[in-house]
């Protein structure tokens, strides 16, 4: 039973070791929203919001998520009690439109809480079975093709099982040629466009087939499933959708339209772990590949992603990297580390399986707000 007494919402500031540049903008410092849900027995669970600082990747931002959680999502969730996290998801979806990143922040925290209370790992609670998950690196746009190629070769030497590079108009072929040349023909290589192209670029995108890419991620704008389908018909390279897939229903549309052959699942983008599981099951049924994406998360969001990626159909390395790829110091103990190109799934610990470093967290906190259930609501307060 999930019977919450309070939701603590916090924004922290965490500087990235190096700026992360994609076709639509760059991130230097992360502003990260974290939610801690606390139940009436004092048990707690953590969730992390994947919204960015500005609406480059999606319409939601850190500030819209703060507004949505404090004004609508937290009061909505706190007004009742629930059998399990999927009920929390269902109630949020039925009662409030959009704001899926904000909803996911709270929904994912209830999964950690429920798993912790049950004394099982989040991986086990989700139906995961893998003891370890393969790492993949997502390299942002760099200053020149040789610099990018050196970064890619370094990543392969470190043990990453797949390299993904960000691509942008006017520089894609030079970047891809340099990287393919540096890593050789056998390293799985993907390209992520973050919606930088348009249907008029179809012939050009066809020319990228020669680089033997495992996937071309999100070439066109998120809403345009139809033109992705038309593009896929002309490409040898499988299209993977990221921004486009905001719910299980959109995944079903993609499958029906044949808009691509793979889905980058980010629980934070689709409204939480409940819809992420639904997309995983749907994809498995239809022979669509899935892998777990990343959004430059701290160790909390990474824990949720690792647990999800331990499910059986996640058979392709995701954007899952160790803490040290992003941060001088992560906010969890132990930090996420890579061994032989793998991250270990903490299946021997309850919940997300990592300890949040509250002292360090406090030192990075820029705002904190606690939304409390009215005593007597939720049914468990009396
Ligand atoms: O499109 O996958 C993306 C980061 C921010 C916004 C969008 C994306 C990304 C990444 C980063 O590719 C992956 C990671 O967390 O390492
Ligand atoms: Mg992407």
Image (cartoon, grey):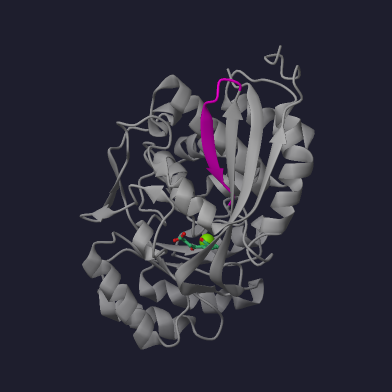
Residue drawn at point x = 52 percent, y = 57 percent: 363
Query: Dividing the picture into quarters, in which one does residue 198 lie?
Result: bottom right
Where residue 378 sits in the image (x, y, percent)?
72, 19
Magenta segment: does it hold 250? no
Q: Is 29 displayed left or right of 9 in the figure?
A: left
Residue 104 visible to the viewer? no
- Image quadrant holding the N terminus, namely top right
In the depicted view, which residue is nearer to us: 346 or 224? 346
Residue drawn at point x = 75 percent, y = 16 percent: 376
In the depicted view, which residue is nearer to us: 109 or 244? 109
Q: Please give the range of residues in magenta.
A: 40-49
Residue drawn at point x = 39 percent, y = 86 percent: 145
Residue 137 position (above or below residue 94): below
Residue 354 visible to the viewer? yes
Residue 167 position (above or below residue 194): below
Residue drawn at point x = 46 percent, y = 49 percent: 359
In the depicted view, which residue is nearer to us: 130 or 363? 363
How many badges with numbers are in the image? 0
In the depicted view, which residue is nearer to us: 63 or 238? 63
Q: Is 13 displayed left or right of 209 in the figure?
A: right
Query: Dividing the picture into quarters, in which one does residue 17 lie?
Result: bottom left
Residue 144 position (above or below residue 82): below
Magenta segment: does it hold 46? yes
Q: Is 277 displayed left or right of 187 in the figure?
A: right
Where residue 278 sits in the image (x, y, percent)?
54, 34
Where residue 125 sits in the image (x, y, percent)?
43, 27
Q: Is 285 displayed left or right of 185 in the figure?
A: right
Where residue 199 sits in the image (x, y, percent)?
65, 71
- Image quadrant holding the C terminus, namely top right
């Amino acid at each position: 039973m999930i019977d919450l007494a309070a939701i603590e919402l916090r924004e922290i500031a965490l500087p990235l070791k190096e700026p992360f540049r994609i076709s639509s903008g760059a991130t230097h410092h992360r502003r990260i929203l974290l939610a801690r849900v606390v139940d009436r027995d004092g048990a707690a669970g953590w969730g992390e919001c994947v919204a960015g600082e500005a609406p480059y990747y999606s319409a939601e931002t850190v500030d819209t998520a703060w507004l949505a959680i404090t004004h609508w999502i937290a009061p909505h969730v706190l007004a009742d009690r629930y059998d399990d996290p999927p009920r929390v998801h269902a109630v949020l979806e039925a009662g409030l439109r959009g704001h899926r990143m904000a909803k996911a922040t709270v929904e994912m925290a209830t999964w950690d809480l429920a798993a912790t209370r049950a004394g099982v790992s989040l991986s086990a609670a989700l139906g995961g079975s893998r003891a370890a998950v393969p790492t993949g690196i997502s390299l942002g746009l760099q200053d020149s093709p040789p610099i990018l190629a050196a970064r890619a070769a370094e990543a392969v030497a470190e043990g990453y099982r797949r390299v993904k590079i960000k691509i942008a108009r006017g520089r894609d072929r030079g970047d891809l040629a340099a990287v393919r040349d540096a890593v050789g023909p056998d390293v799985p290589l993907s390209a992520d466009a973050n919606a930088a192209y348009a249907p008029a670029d179809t012939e050009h995108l066809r020319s990228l087939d020669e680089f033997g890419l495992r996937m071309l991620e999100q070439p066109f704008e998120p809403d345009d499933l139809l033109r992705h389908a038309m593009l896929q018909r002309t490409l040898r390279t499988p299209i993977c959708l990221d921004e486009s897939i905001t719910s299980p229903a959109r995944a079903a549309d993609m499958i029906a339209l044949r808009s691509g052959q793979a889905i980058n699942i980010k629980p934070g983008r689709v409204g939480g772990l409940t819809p992420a599981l639904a997309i995983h099951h749907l994809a498995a049924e239809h022979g669509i590949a899935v892998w777990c994406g990343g959004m430059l998360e701290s160790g909390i969001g990474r824990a949720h992603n690792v647990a999800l990626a331990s499910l059986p159909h996640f058979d392709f390395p995701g954007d899952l990297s160790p803490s040290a790829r992003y941060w001088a110091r992560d906010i969890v103990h132990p930090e996420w580390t890579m061994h032989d190109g793998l991250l270990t799934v903490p299946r021997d610990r309850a919940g997300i399986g990592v300890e949040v470093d509250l002292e360090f967290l406090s030192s990075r906190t820029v705002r904190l707000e606690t939304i409390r259930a009215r005593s007597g609501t939720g049914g468990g307060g009396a």
